[in-house]
Amino acid sequence: MRTVRTTPLLAAGIAAAAFLSTLTPAAASPAPAGLRWQPCGGPAPAALQCATLTVPLDYADPGGRKIDIAVSRLRASRPQERRGVLLLNPGGPGGPGLDLPVDPAVDLSEEVRSRYDLIGFDPRGVGRSSPVGCGLTADEQDHERPYRAETFAKDVEWARTVADKCRTKAGDTLRHLTTRNTARDMDAIRGALGERKISYLGFSYGTYLGAVYAQMFPRRTDRFVLDSAADPTRVWQGMFQGMAEGADAAFARWSEWTARRHTTYGLGSTPAEVRRTFWDLVARADREPVDSAGTPLTGDGIRAQHARFAHVEKAAEWIAALKAAAPPTAAPATREVPPDNDTASAWAVLCGDSRTWPHDPERYRLDAVRDAARHPLYGDFASNIKPCAFWGQGSEPPTTVDNGAGALILQNEWDPSTPLPGALAMHRALHGSRMVTVAGGEGHIVNGTNPCATRALTTYLTTGTLPPHDLTCETPPTPTPNPPRKP
């Protein structure tokens, strides 16, 4: 997911889960004291300033326990042209956003940067914002678990263990790590900045966060851009299942594309032959793991990387390399927070936002069997049991997104993590929105990948003018690749 940030759960950021209630719009968050800015330190550029905002853990108890929200600011490059602030969120859930204003992956024109202070923040419980952890082992953080009848009992135990550890270690905190509370934190940031409204650019899960903010604080919402939109009607169990649906469609497209290039990749001259090559490779890897970038992959491990098939050329190169056993190398990332912070904070939102997760393991087993047949590439992964089966309820019901916000939605046609049907659902929920679809666009996150979409984003953020109607942007044709080198 090219991506601003790859979440460990919705990699590469999701029975549809209908929201249970429509909540009345929230009042503005209490205005906190102004922020005290100072250099962020470390490798951050000197122009990036950081501050800490203290907010209630539970907004229903504003005098109770407090947590910190880490905020950053990169001032507008032309103060005389400044319009306001543009908050940024990388997605996830569980994605830190403090460095986004200076992250080169966030592609914003000088026209936009001249008019806005760019505001980054680590969402509650993430990164430098009172980070949480559950003490999970590396194996317990691995949620990619295909359904097998003989291992299902172990998967149930894994889900129960994750939920129990999180409840024991940080249960009083995790239940308040919800999208609604993060939206309230955003409004507290707005108040601390002294702004009447905020503009916003959110990616992946960040599109849902932006939509929830617009639902809760419509009068505080200015120009909102939602890049690679999540389906607000399928939060969150249905979004995992939506990935499986999108994965099979992308896999079918990849099979056809690759078959037309048999002389290059040698994977089959018809789509059926390409699919047979793939499934033969999966079966072989289940017998003896295949090395990929220094990591041995089983057949299930290959299927778990379903998002690769949204990029037809890269996927063909990858499968050809697996077949030839020619791995590259990769280095892991590090972070000065609890080692399971991404996973713990993500499960808190995924499980606590929705009250529609089944609690009976048998329901998950039946769904996984059904979806393995419907969507062979990833269906059993998506529907297998999750820690949410044993998670306590979040602090409040979820938000139904249904408003007239004038947002701009950017969406690739072949997005493996937030598939096109989900973005269309977001478009319907935000009645004043316009949608820019990149026809043939591959991968998760549009930002910086298509000049037509970039023009629409720049025009909207600088002038406030949405396209008069939904747009379709074309993707340049993929050049014929050179044959891969022999190992």
Image: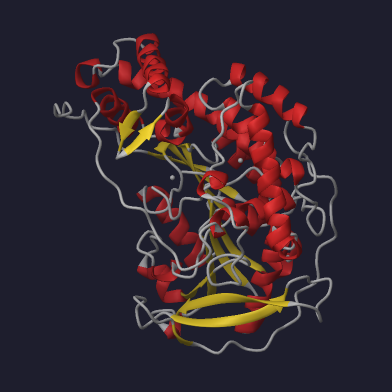
Residue at the image point whose x is 22% and y is 31% from the top? 326
Residue 469 in view (yes/no): no
In the rendered view, tell whether residue 209 sits above or below residue 255.
Answer: below
Which part of the image, by quadrant, shows the C terminus? Answer: top left
Question: Taking 462 as reference, is 167 left or right?
Answer: right
Say which of 18 and 130 sits in front: 130
Q: Toward the viewer: 152 or 391? A: 152
> Relative to 373, does residue 103 appear above or below in the rendering?
below
Q: Report x, y in % for residue 175.
A: 75, 59
Instruction: Judge left or right: residue 57 versus residue 91.
Output: right
Residue 435 position, x and y percent, is 55, 46
Rendered position, 288 above or below 237: above
Image quadrant for the N terminus? top left
Residue nearest the viewer, comparing 105 with 169: 169
Q: Nearer the viewer, residue 241 or 165?
A: 165
- How many numbered marks does the figure carry? 0
Q: How is the image coloured?
A: secondary structure
| Residue at the image point whose x is 68% and y is 53% from the top | 165
Counting from the top left corner in percent of width and height, residue 208 is at 63, 52
Residue 261 appears in the picture as rendered = yes
Q: Dividing the picture into quarters, in which one does residue 32 lie?
A: bottom right
The percent position of residue 317, horizontal first and vertical second, equals 27, 30
Answer with the quarter of the image where residue 314 lies: top left
Q: Is residue 283 left or right of residue 90?
A: left
Outermost residue toward the left? 486
Q: Residue at x 76, y 28 (%)?
A: 363
Above or below, 423 against 132 in this view is: above
